[in-house]
Image: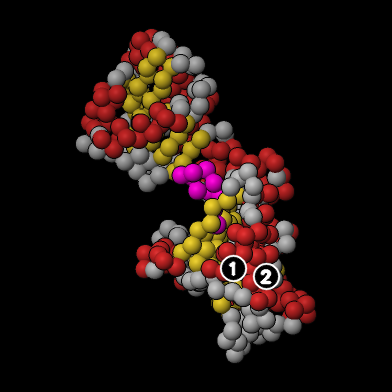
Amino acid sequence: MNLHEYQGKELLSSFGVRIQRGIVAQNADEAVAAAEKLTEETGTGWHVIKAQVHAGGRGKGGGVKLAKNLEEVKSISDQIIGMDLVTPQTSAEGKRVHQVLVAEDVYYPGETETSEFYMSVLLNRANGRNMIMYSTEGGMDIETVAEETPHLIFTEEIDPASGLLGFQARKIAFNLGLSGAAFKDMTKFVSALYRAYVESDSSLFEINPVLKTSDNKIMAVDAKVTLDDNALYRHKDLAEMRDLREENQIEVEAGALGLNYVDLDGNVGCMVNGAGLAMATMDLIKQAGGEPANFLDVGGTADAARVEAAFKIILKDPAVKAILINIFGGIVRCDRVAQGVIDAYKNMGNIDVPIIVRLQGTNADIAKELIDNSGLDVMSATEFQEAADKVQTVLA
């Protein structure tokens, strides 16, 4: 689950990580009030207005701007809120901005002694250890740094049994070229950051940039935080931060129905029981010359109601030109699935795309007979290749 920048910073701050202070605003008037409050608390006269969407590269799309007075705070906030922000990490349509973060300006006019760093905490899946990745090249896309100057990217792997050790935090500060007060503050920053990552059950922290101010303080100027969905039951307060407006609405609806659904860009809808079989089915569609429109695992209880719900979800995608149902009857009997398909088809009454049903396993022969005798425009198959051939035929 992704968090907005302001939410990520709130999480970091609760663990003692120094952050660039800011206040979220839903409209221009709230933004002005937020700027006035920040000026009162911090003394800053300039403010950074940041669009709050789940996407990186906001500045490149015009979603991050500097306001030098309250009039600019209002006009910039009014421009950004409501815009469809297009960044390198969004679709061509962009993402609608519903709110902005009004943040203190930590780059003081005329200041020359600041430094920007990149830092992230994530899981190294190759060895099952957490890893801190960092670089002196903060403020840049880490992909660009990796491609052009890979020697400027450092990694520190942490043994889960011992956690982050003091010498590792000091090593990071040393590799970033820090000394004196900045060195000490960076070791505290790294330790607090790692503790926040572990105790919040996150899967990614990305701070870009981490700023060293002219008075040698280390702070997070940005924060990209991704929480592990599987651990949210332990963090009810963090689960409440979920912003459904930022997510694919079909996926949100499918999740509410208990369906495991991922929206894709293809033309063949998939309805399968079991993640492994779903992946194999997507390969089958590719081999047949099509492109999977979704990943959809209906689980082991593919009854009529569940099948009907899955049909409705798949058909919300106007790009779907055919539907392939691929069920292995182990826990569930194939004849029950077949009856579920028939009942769902009749109940909906407006399915105008070809449907291929492959049922294999318990009572597969009975299931095929039910489909064939239903009088509906549904094609049955029992073998993988047979299903592939029929997909190829309907797409031709």
Residue 56 seen anywhere in this rendered image of the structure: no
Please tell me how crowded label 1 is: few (under 14), some (14-19), or many (20+) other residues with Cα within 10 Å. Answer: many
Residue at position x 23%, y 27% from top? Answer: 389
SS assignment for the magenta stretch, majority: strand
User: Mark 1 near mark 2, Cβ–Cβ under 8 Å?
Assistant: yes
Q: Residue furthest front?
A: 167
Q: Could you say whether the residue bearing mark 2 is in a helix, strand or loop?
A: helix
Q: What amino acid is found at the position of numbered circle 2 in the picture? A: Lys
What is the span of residues highlighted in magenta in the rendered image? 122-132
> Looking at the picture, how far across and down is residue 233, in whole percent?
68, 39
Residue 191 seen anywhere in this rendered image of the structure: yes
Q: Give the distance between the C-alpha atoms of the residues marked 1 and 2, in whole angstroms.
A: 8 Å
> Looking at the picture, how far across and down is residue 345, in whole percent?
43, 25
Residue 7 located within the stretch drawn in magenta: no
- Disc tally is 2
Q: What amino acid is found at the position of numbered circle 1 in the picture? A: Ala
- Residue to which mark 1 is pinned: 173
Left of 245 or right of it: where is 42?
right
> Looking at the picture, how far across and down is residue 95, in whole percent?
50, 60
Which of these two is toward me, 217 or 57?
217
Which of these two is toward me, 320 or 234?
234
Residue at position x 64%, y 72% from top? Answer: 183
- Residue to which mark 2 is pinned: 184
- Res 13 → quadrant: bottom right
* Vertical relation: 141 (above or below) 278: below
> Looking at the picture, how far across and down is residue 396, in whole percent?
21, 36
